[in-house]
Image (spheres, rainbow, N blue to C red):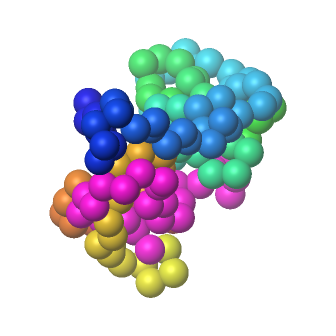
Amino acid sequence: MIVLVNVKGQGPLPSPSCPPWGRNKPGQCNLQFVDTCDCPTDAAWCDHDGECPGSQKCCGWGCGCRRMCAPPGVTDWPIPGRLTSRCQLPKVVGPCKALITRFYFNSNTQRCEQFFYGGCCGNANNFETYAACRSACTGASSYK
């Protein structure tokens, strides 16, 4: 945890807040839970709604599979053309002021590119290394 202290020593500065929709977006996850353990390899994995583009939600769908981004209300898998890979998300620097070197996949140039992450309120298209970005977004298993 990083605590910023103001110049006059009056205590910690308030932390920038992420948009209120960052973690919980409106709507429900209605994906039907599966009985088999064939987890799709091309889904946009996520940990919370804020990592999903637009109105998509981060939904669990059973059998130990990770959660994936899906439009609210969708019940069936697969959902062709409606999921968005983390590699298609925009670069998000965030409102914090750290200068952390990270990499994101630029879907326009089809390349991993360096950027400076502010340290908070980013999205899933944020990789610690160039190699991690390439592995996730330029391999045969990436969803583009």
Visible residue check, residue 63? yes
Q: Is residue 14 above or below residue 109?
A: above
Residue lying farthest front? 8
Q: Report whether 94 appears left or right of 56.
A: left
Question: Residue 16: x percent and y percent?
Answer: 49, 43
Q: Quadrant of the N terminus?
A: top left
**Residue beneath the point at 46% across and 36% down:** 14
Q: Which residues are magenta?
A: 78-106
**Residue beneath the point at 49% across and 74% down:** 107
Question: Residue 44: x percent and y percent?
Answer: 51, 46
Residue nearer the viewer, 68 or 127: 127
Question: Residue 43: x percent and y percent?
Answer: 51, 45
Q: Is residue 35 above or below residue 18?
A: above
Q: Report whether 101 appears left or right of 12.
A: left
Residue nearer the viewer, 58 or 143: 58
**Residue beneath the point at 48% across and 60% down:** 92
Residue nearer the viewer, 4 or 20: 4
Total numbered labels placed on residues in the image: 0
Visible residue check, residue 40? no
Q: Report whether 47 appears left or right of 114.
A: right
Q: Is residue 36 above or below residue 47?
A: above
State yes or no: residue 115 in magenta. no
Q: Is residue 111 above or below residue 80?
A: below
Question: Residue 56: x percent and y percent?
Answer: 69, 43
Residue nearer the viewer, 122 or 97: 97
Q: Quadrant of residue 4?
A: top left
Prevailing secondary structure of the magenta residues: loop
**Residue beneath the point at 40% across and 68% down:** 105
